[in-house]
Image (cartoon, grey):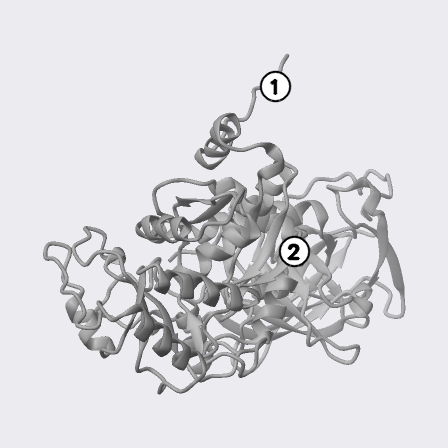
């Protein structure tokens, strides 16, 4: 039976049509162009997977280009973090490029535009320029400086470049039309004076190009065939094409800009400004705080590259914006970790169990399967003794018939071990249960092939031997915001929707096989969830981050 051919998304269809009419396969080239003013977040993952995925599909080069035209917000730290994240996702770029690589070329082209009457220096305030822009229903007003002579514009623009013009005074504007229906075409700003050092060019430049001027021409210089961006840039396409027509180089391919819809993620924000505010206000500790939606944070929390790529592929590429449930992202993480993560036992809310008929000085090392989803994962030995920890919520003195865990007079199986029966419990002065006394069936050991070992009981509990348990700091994380869309209400500060229970740190009791767990190793704590060794973990103090639970338990 033939396998049905996977349908093309609309971006792939654009490329296929262009291959028939406009381009050869050898001309295909893509790019991922982040601004290094923050860490990449889950929203960027879709763009990364789209562009690098197209590169793999069409065997075409993909450049990693940093749109570094604003020295007041950009830092080398962000450049390094972006490269680290793209590499971690498993992608390789053809060339590492920077808009700042092209500052001289952009300046030279701007000079040509002035000479051709397509650009002029405006000495008005930013407020005056904004006021003269008009509205979508009323035409703008031409600047009183719009008809300066070419000579005057050239002289003033050079003064701007040399730092002789005060910061923020003059700007270079494209001369298009103040009556254009698209307000971005109403003489947009190409350069502004900014006397700030740049992370790559130092103090060489006193003027910096605006995004619309630098971005399209960078695509042109690199000979990118298809420039894919999110829908908010759709109005920019007309300006993108206008600038491209003003730069004429023989036999050069003109890039094509096309837009796709942003996929928003529920219960979070992805604005870099807002993410930075969360750090500055102390709601999170850093860009890679495991509650953040950044790729660095998700890596630290224990997400796998494959789970993020699968998430991006599953939500697809569309023409309409929508919000994707955080639960779907967690599903993708859970699905991938289920195949890969070693199973171990850990108790996070301990209650002591004493098996009264088990010899006091005896211990056994029982066989435990590492991962039932992976035959090659092998097994390990887990110590068993008279005194154990189980989860406090796994015992009740009395319970209805639907409670299949441990209760007085009833039996459960201990995972990989024996069947035990609760006989009595010990309470403190406040009436809290602090110990459960049990008996065990010595012939019921798992895998012993006795009749008792084959006996069926409805409940199976995880446990840890008290004498062998190692302690660890366990960080429990939940959604950072209580509501689906924290930024939806413009009258309410998004910070008011912070979830006060998004972080809790507790002491966990773990089986001894975890003593040598390495940073970034991922495990399934059986019956609890998936956990990852945090970067702050040491041999003296293990630290685990909760990645995701075994099932979706969010009620928000």
The mark that comes first in sequence, 2 or 1, is 1
Q: What element carries label 2?
A: loop
Spatial separation of the CA atoms under disc 2 and disc 1: 36 Å
The residue carrying pointer 2 sits among few (fewer than 14), some (14 to 19) or many (20 or more) residues within 10 Å by Cα, namely few
The image quadrant of residue 520 is bottom right
Please say whether residue 551 is visible from this viewpoint.
no
Residue 438 vertical position relative to residue 55 in the rendered view, above or below: below
Q: Is mark 1 on a helix, strand or loop?
A: loop
The residue carrying pointer 1 sits among few (fewer than 14), some (14 to 19) or many (20 or more) residues within 10 Å by Cα, namely few
Task: Give residue 58's position: percent from left, percent from top.
Answer: 62, 35
Say which of marks 2 and 1 sits in front.
Answer: 2
Left/right placement of residue 135 relative to residue 164 reads left
Task: Give residue 209's position: percent from left, percent from top.
Answer: 42, 68
Task: Give residue 53's position: percent from left, percent from top.
Answer: 59, 42
Task: Give residue 221's position: percent from left, percent from top.
Answer: 54, 54
Query: Who is closer to the viewer here, 196 or 164?
Result: 164
All told, the count of numbered labels is 2
> Which residue is drawn at the image coordinates 62% and 14% (left, top)?
2
> Which residue is drawn at the image coordinates 56% and 77% (left, top)?
199
Left/right placement of residue 378 relative to residue 274 reads right
**Disc 2 marks which residue?**
95
Q: Mark 1 and mark 2 in contact (Cβ < 8 Å)?
A: no
Residue 230 vertical position relative to residue 116 in the rendered view, above or below: above
Quarter of the image for the C terminus: give it.
bottom left
Please say whether residue 177 is visible from this viewpoint.
yes
Query: Who is closer to the viewer here, 235 or 251?
Result: 251
Quarter of the image for the N terminus: give it.
top right
Which mark, residue 232?
none
**Disc 1 marks which residue?**
3
Left/right placement of residue 446 relative to residue 322 reads right
Q: Residue furthest left?
A: 138
């Amino acid at each position: 039976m033939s396998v049905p051919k996977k349908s093309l998304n609309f971006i792939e269809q654009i490329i296929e049509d262009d291959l028939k009419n406009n381009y050869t396969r050898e001309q295909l080239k893509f790019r991922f162009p982040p601004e290094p003013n923050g860490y990449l977040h889950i929203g960027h993952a879709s763009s990364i997977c789209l562009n690098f995925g197209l590169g793999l599909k069409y065997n075409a080069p993909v450049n990693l280009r940093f749109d570094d035209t604003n020295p007041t917000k950009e830092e080398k730290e962000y450049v390094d973090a972006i490269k680290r994240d793209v590499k971690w996702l498993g992608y390789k770029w053809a060339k590492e490029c920077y808009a700042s690589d092209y500052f001289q070329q952009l300046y030279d082209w701007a000079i040509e535009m002035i000479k051709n009457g397509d650009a002029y220096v405006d000495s008005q305030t930013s407020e005056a320029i904004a006021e003269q822009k008009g509205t979508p229903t009323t035409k703008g007003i031409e600047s009183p400086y719009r008809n300066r002579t070419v000579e005057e514009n050239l002289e003033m623009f050079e003064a701007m470049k040399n730092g002789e013009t005060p910061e923020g005074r003059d700007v270079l504007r494209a001369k298009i039309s103040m009556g254009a229906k698209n307000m971005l075409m109403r003489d947009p700003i190409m350069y502004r004076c900014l006397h700030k050092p740049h992370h790559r060019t130092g103090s060489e430049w006193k003027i910096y190009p605006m995004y619309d001027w630098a971005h399209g021409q960078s695509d042109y210089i690199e000979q990118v065939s298809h420039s894919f961006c999110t829908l908010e840039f759709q109005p920019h396409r007309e300006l993108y094409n206008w600038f491209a027509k003003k730069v004429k180089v023989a036999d050069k391919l003109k890039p094509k800009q096309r837009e796709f819809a942003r996929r928003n993620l529920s219960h979070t924000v992805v604005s870099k400004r807002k993410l930075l505010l969360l750090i500055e206000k102390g709601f999170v500790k850093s860009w890679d705080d495991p509650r953040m939606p950044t790729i660095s944070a998700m890596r630290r929390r224990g997400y796998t590259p494959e789970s993020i790529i699968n998430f991006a592929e599953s939500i697809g590429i569309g023409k309409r914006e929508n919000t994707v449930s955080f639960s779907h992202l967690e599903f993708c993480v859970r699905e991938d970790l289920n195949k890969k993560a070693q199973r171990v036992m850990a108790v996070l809310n301990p209650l002591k169990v004493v098996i009264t008929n088990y010899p006091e000085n005896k211990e056994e090392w029982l066989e435990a399967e590492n991962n039932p989803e992976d035959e090659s994962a092998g097994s390990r030995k887990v110590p068993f003794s008279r005194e154990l920890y189980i989860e406090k919520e796994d015992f009740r003195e009395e319970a209805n018939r639907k409670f299949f865990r441990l209760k007085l007079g009833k039996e459960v199986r201990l995972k990989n071990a024996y069947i035990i029966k609760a006989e009595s419990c010990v309470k403190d002065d406040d009436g809290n249960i602090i110990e459960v006394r049990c008996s065990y069936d010595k012939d019921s050991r798992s895998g012993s092939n006795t009749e008792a070992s084959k006996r069926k009981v409805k409940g199976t509990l995880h446990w840890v031997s008290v004498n062998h348990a190692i302690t660890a700091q366990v960080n429990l994380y939940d959604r950072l915001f209580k509501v689906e869309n924290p930024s939806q209400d413009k009258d309410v500060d998004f910070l008011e929707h912070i979830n006060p229970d998004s972080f809790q740190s507790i002491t966990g009791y773990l089986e001894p096989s975890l003593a040598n767990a390495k940073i970034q190793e991922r495990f399934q704590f059986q019956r609890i969830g998936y956990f990852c060794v945090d970067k702050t973990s040491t041999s003296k103090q293990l630290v685990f981050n909760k990645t995701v639970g075994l099932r979706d338990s969010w009620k928000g």
